[in-house]
Amino acid sequence: MLRNAIAPSRDYTPISNTHVWDDNLSDSAFRLLVRSLALPPSRARGTTVTELAAGLPCGRITADRARRQLSGAGLLHCARWRNATGQVRTESLVSSVPIDEAEAERLFAEHFAKGGPDAGKRGSGGPAAQESGTALPEGERLTEGDTSPLPVPSPEPTGQGREPEIGQADPALLAEAERVLLSLRRADPRLVLGASEVRRLLPLAAEWLARGVSSTGMQHALTSGLPNPVKCPSALLRSRLRDKMPAPVRVVALRACEGCDRAFRPLNDEPLCGSCRQQAAAQAAPARADGNGTRVGWRERVARVTRG
C-alpha cells in the first residue's frame, strides 16, 4: 500500500490514533467526534451535538447509537442546567481524550459558574436524554451567548395536540374505557396491561368513546394487525390511540321545517324536513296519466309493459 501523507499547515484537527483504531467506535461515532472537535471555539459555544448528529449521512437511530458509543467511551458527557429565565437546557462536553465523571463535573462547574446558583446542577441518573435530532432552522444564527440553537417548545394550548386528562372525561366513559382496555388481553394474550398503564391510557380511550366510537370498534382498532412480537403493549396501544384518534363528530343544531314547522336536523342546510321534501318532489314530478286522465303509478306501468 502506497501513501502520500502531507501534514496540513492550517485547518486541521488533531485526533489520537487510539480513536482511529478503536473498533468500538462506528464510522458515524468517529465522524461525530471529529466534527465536534473541528468546530472553532466561537461556534462550538453555540452548537450542540444534536445539531452535528442531524447532519450525519445516516438515520436518527444510527446517530443516537453514535452518541451512546461516545458516551460509553468517556468522550461525550451531558449535563442539565437552568438558565436565568428558568428554562432547563442540556449542555454537552466533547473531549479528545476519555475523561471520567469527576473530571467532567469539574469542567461543567467551571462553565456554569457564571450562570447562577442552580446553573451547574447535574441531573441524576447519568447523561440527560437526547434531543430529537432537529437541525438548525432556516434563517437562524449561532451567537456566542447561545448554549443551544434549538428553541424550547412553548406549551401547547388546550385542544391542539395536548392529550386529554382524566378529570375532564365523563365518569361513565372512563368506566367503559377501562372495561375495554382490560378486555384486550382476551382478544390477544400479548396485550396484558398493568393497573398504572391502564390509568395512563384511560383519557385517550375515553376520548374515543366521547367521539362516537363504539366499544367494539375501538377494540377492533387496537387489536387488528398487531406486529410480531409486541415488545411493549402499553406503548403500542398509546400510539394507536393517538394516531388513529377519530375526528370529532359535528352536532348540527335543530331547526324548524318551513313546511310543517316540525323540528329536524338538516344535512346540507335545507329548509324542509324529509317528509316535506318527498311531498314537494312528488308534486314536482307527478305520475303519468292514462288516456282518461287517471293517475298511473310505476307499478301499473311496469305491469302493462310486461303484459305487452
Image (cartoon, rainbow, N blue to C red):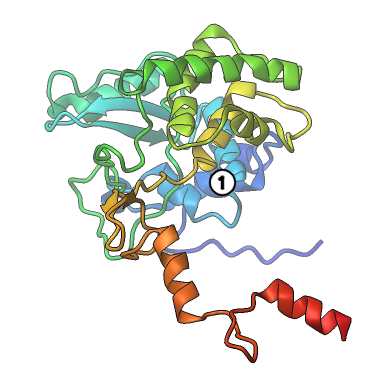
Q: How many marks?
A: 1
Q: Amino acid at mark 1?
A: Arg
**Left or right of 270 in this view: 119:** left
Return the x and y of residue 260 as percentages of the image width and height. 31, 57
Judge by depth and name the residue closer to the eye, 203 or 279: 279
Look at the image and tell me whether residue 70 can be seen. Answer: no
Which residue sits furthest front?
Answer: 292
> Which residue is situated farthest in the bottom direction here?
291
The image quadrant that residue 206 belongs to is top left
Closer to us: 236 or 153: 236
User: Residue 220 appears at what percent x and percent y?
Assistant: 67, 33
In the depicted structure, whether residue 127 falls above or below residue 56: above
Q: Residue at x 60, y 85 (%)?
A: 289
Q: Which residue is painted at 25% across and 22% down in the image?
A: 109
- Tell me where residue 122 appears, x and y as whole percent: 32, 18
Identified at 52% across, 80% down, the residue is: 286
SS of the residue at dot 1? helix
Q: Is residue 204 among the parts visible in the rendering?
A: yes
In the rendered view, tell whether residue 278 sits above or below residue 93.
below
Residue 300, compared with residue 274, is above or below; it is below
Disc 1 crowd, CA 10 A, few/some/many (<14, 14-19, 20+): some
Q: Quadrant of the N terminus?
A: bottom right
Image quarter of the C terminus: bottom right
Q: With respect to residue 251, does 69 lie above or below?
A: above
Tell me if 69 is positioned left or right of 137 in this view.
Answer: right
**Percent coordinates x, y for residue 120 in the rendering:** 24, 22
Instruction: List the residue tagged with mark 1.
Output: 60
Q: Nearer the viewer, residue 97 or 48?
A: 48
